[in-house]
Image: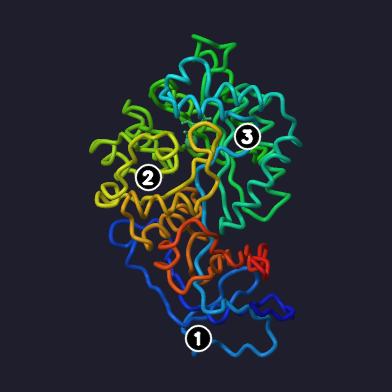
Amino acid sequence: MSRHAARDNSLLIRDIGTLAAVPPGPLTGERMQTWPLLHDAALLVRDGRIAWFGPAHKTPPDEGIATLSAAGGTVIPGLIDPHTHIPFVGDRSAEFIRRVAGETYLQILEAGGGIRVTMQAVRAASVDDLVAANLPRLRRMLAGGVVRVECKSGYGLAPEPELRQLEAVRELARRQPVRLHATYLAAHAVPPEFDGRPDAYLDLVADPALLADIARRGLAEFCDVFCDRGAFTVAQARRVLERARAAGLRPRLHADELARIGATQLAGELAALSADHLEHIDDAGIAALRAAGTVAVVLPGTSFFLGIPHADARRLIAAGLPVALATDYNPGSCMIESLAWIMSIAVCQLRLQPAEVLAACTANAAAALGVQSRAGALAVGYDADLVLLDVPTLDAWLYEPGRPHVRAVLVGGRTVWEMRPDD
Ligand code: NIG
Ligand code: FE
């Protein structure tokens, strides 16, 4: 890859073998895979945004501006992971091994394990500890082409440690280039001191003054609830999310993961930005999400890691829902930080086409975070968050999982990660 010193705020990316011109989301149905692939292309960045792209022979005169060669590879919009449980600390490998031996996630959760184990570790961690443990994770995600990540609290399970997790997200955003979006997920589990009193716990963590304070300080943009068997009921989730929405935190929901209890209908009713998991969704749930324009976030890494059936992403796409993919990266149900791995599962096991997978991890993931008017697409005026891959086509990329393909990552037009020349 050749690069010349920048003389102004412009950069020309040339020698692009395939340019994945994903349009702005949300994309549904056929539109998830019928967007343009330009061959032998170039792209111009100005002031951190995409200023032009098209066939190489039509490149505007570039006298003196910085250039970056894609060396015949593929250029895609930066990948977006719209559902993670970063920042967390602690180890739950013992629980993982118990599951391998036959216990289920729900059995372990109901026996007091699971989320509460991570809660103990997070309660004992300072903001600095949380930052130190999660910076390398974000660094590796960036090296995998991920430029924007949603981060949830939900392991403090009391106001102070929940806010500490959100403060850690803010600090992480300052310390590295991946763009972060914080979600308040105190309604993730009932902590031991509130055993048998979930409503009293929710009154504490969904207190209107506390929610207003979180929103006012910009500590979170979204509020999420784990609404499932073994977690919170639909009535409880509604109460939390209505209060959150009144405080200015947009709702999203963990829905239909372990059982179908009506969480997707609630997501639709509240016009949640996303409903995530959906392994047990039915036609009524699909209709509710569709009517509300809610993004369906599918998390195939969780099914893989827990050994449970996948969400039927083909059915969701056929039903006209904008489908996004995410890692669900967390220490209990999916200790997989690699979005590339999730994309491979989506192709090989959910039978998504490579173009659909990319749309799910860019345009539709941006829509799940409410940033589709500036991110997740290859469009003039959009953030120049771009990934250069070492393969000539999209198909070649997903055909060969299990090895890194990212040559360089740009955020706001700046190269923030590059493969070493001898890699
Ligand atoms: O998305 N479902 C709830 N929350 C996580 C699991 C969290 C944990 O086990 O620590 C999930 O699967
Ligand atoms: Fe999750």
The answer, for residue 235, to whether it is visible in the render is no
Q: Label 3 belongs to which residue?
A: 88
Local SS, label 3 = loop
251 to the left or right of 315: right
Q: Amino acid at mark 2?
A: Ala
Query: In the rendered picture of this protein, how many numbered marks are placed on residues?
Result: 3
Among the 4 quarters of the image, the one containing residue 160: top right
- Up the image or down, 74 lies above or below 164; here it is below
Callout 1 environment at 10 Å: few (<14), some (14 to 19), or many (20+)? some
Which residue is farthest top?
196
x, y percentage for residue 21? Answer: 44, 70
Q: Earlier in the sequence, mark 1 or mark 2?
A: 1
Q: Secondary structure at mark 1?
A: helix
Q: Which residue is mark 2?
A: 296
Give yes or no for contact between labels 2 and 3 (Cβ–Cβ under 8 Å).
no
Task: Decide if residue 27 is on the left or right side of residue 113.
Answer: left
Q: Residue 156 appears in which quarter of the rendering?
A: top right
Q: How far across and down, in percent of the image, does residue 324 sit?
A: 41, 50
Label 3 C-beta lies within 8 Å of the nearest ligand 1 atom: yes
- The crowding category of the residue bearing disc 3, from other C-alpha atoms within 10 Å (few below 14, some 14 to 19, many at least 20), is many
Residue 200 screen position, x and y as percent:
53, 13
Seen at 53% across and 38% down, the residue is 335
Q: 70 and 403: which one is in front?
A: 403
Residue that label 1 marks: 56
